[in-house]
Image: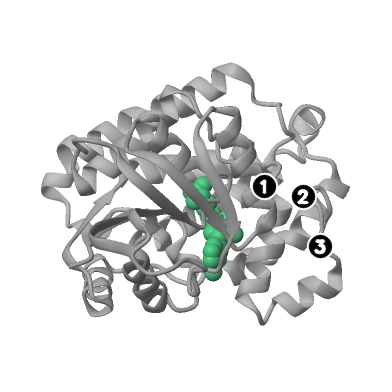
Amino acid sequence: MTEMDDPDSDAISRAQNDPKLANVLYHDWEASTYDAKWNISYDQRCIDYANDRFEHVAGAVDAPYARALELGSGTGFFLLNLMQAKVAATGVLTDISPGMVDVAVRGGRELGLDVTGQVADAEQLPFSDTSFDLVVGHAVLHHLPDVELAMREVLRVLKPGGRFVFCGEPTNYGDFVARRLSRLTWWAAARATRLPVWRDRWARPADELAKSSQVALLESVVDLHTFDPDQLARLCLRAGAVDVKTVTEELTASWFGWPVRTFEAAVKPGALGWNWAQFAYRGWLGLSWLDQHVLERVVPDELFYNVCVTGTRP
Ligand SMILES: C[S@@+](CC[C@H](N)C(=O)[O-])C[C@H]1O[C@@H](n2cnc3c(N)ncnc32)[C@H](O)[C@@H]1O
């Protein structure tokens, strides 16, 4: 299947009972539009974002890690931006979706980075023991049927003393709130954009909505877990890691960000324009600052939306 093809309905129905097939179909289908959907870029904005996530949980790096591996790289958002921030010198981008690996490797080479790519299931890594100094991932653990098995694989391929950093995983409570806010926004936007005064300007064409909802059915199959930060830390310890630490991020920023993103998906592409983009970005940035500098000190960590975890191989 190429990046542009839609999965056929037979494949979609088989994938309902096979989360790994669902991940391949869903993310292959998304690969060519993924960066636009999530507002991902490879400029200073996302370099800072990726580096801040890394430093928030693992601290600043003194010298770049020589050889890094990314699991579930998608289009390469995390590792490519970390490499641009000089966190790692060389990188191997892996994902279960071939379409994602293609986009990630092409993007890395266009940025002039020293990267290779390989299709790989995080639960069964095709690399020999002790071959990496750093393993990273962003928004991938919650897609894996057996997270502990994947963490054992991470520790197997890390060199002794090597570090792993996983960020952007949904917490139990954060995901509960975000999904409800998103559903409410979708419901309201779908009705508002059907009103005659807004229909021409905002409403997405009906055939486009029908097609995207076919593939979107797989979203409920690919999202397998949400996490309690302490339980995630214990899972990493059980897999054999040491020096395990978790931090959580985004409280009010996620209450703002999810409805904004859902609204953007509900209306005609390109209809919202530059002023909206500025409002969305600056609003999210300001609330992230509030979360990190004020609310993280007083609000229980499990209430935040994202959890990051780091640890090392003994
Ligand atoms: C939500 S996307 C995140 C992509 C990217 N890390 C980012 O933050 O933009 C999750 C990615 O994990 C990949 N994935 C899902 N299950 C996987 C598995 N078992 N092994 C490796 N990658 C997997 C998907 O194909 C998808 O590209």
- Nearer to us in this view, 184 or 125: 125
Kindly tell me whether mark 2's CB lies below 8 Å from ligand 1: no
Q: Secondary structure at mark 2?
A: loop
Q: Secondary structure at mark 1?
A: helix
Name the residue beneath numbered marker 2.
3
Task: Give the Cα distance between marks 2 and 3.
Answer: 10 Å
Front position among marks 2 and 3: 2
Q: Would you place residue 175 above or below residue 257 in this image? A: below
Q: Tell me if residue 166 can be seen.
A: no
Please give the residue where the numbered disc 1 appears in the rendered image: 102
Query: Which residue is rendered at x = 22% and y = 61% of the image?
Result: 311
Quarter of the image holding residue 56?
Answer: top left
The local crowd at label 2, few if under 14, some if 14 to 19, many if 20 or more residues have their Cα within 10 Å, is many
Label ID, residue 121:
none
Which quadrant of the figure contains the N terminus?
Answer: bottom right
**Cβ–Cβ below 8 Å for labels 2 and 3?**
no
Q: Which residue is mark 3?
A: 7
Q: Position of residue 21 (x, y in %)?
A: 68, 72
Tell me: 296 left or right of 140: left
Q: Are marks 2 and 1 in contact (CB under 8 Å)?
A: yes
Amino acid type of the residue tagged 3 in the rendering? Pro
Q: Is residue 25 left or right of residue 129?
A: right
Q: Amino acid at mark 2?
A: Glu
Position above or below: 142 against 207: below
Q: Residue 284: x and y, percent?
A: 39, 32
Q: Distance between the Cα atoms at labels 2 and 1?
A: 9 Å
| Amino acid beneath label 1 | Asp
Residue 151 position in % (x across, y down): 35, 71
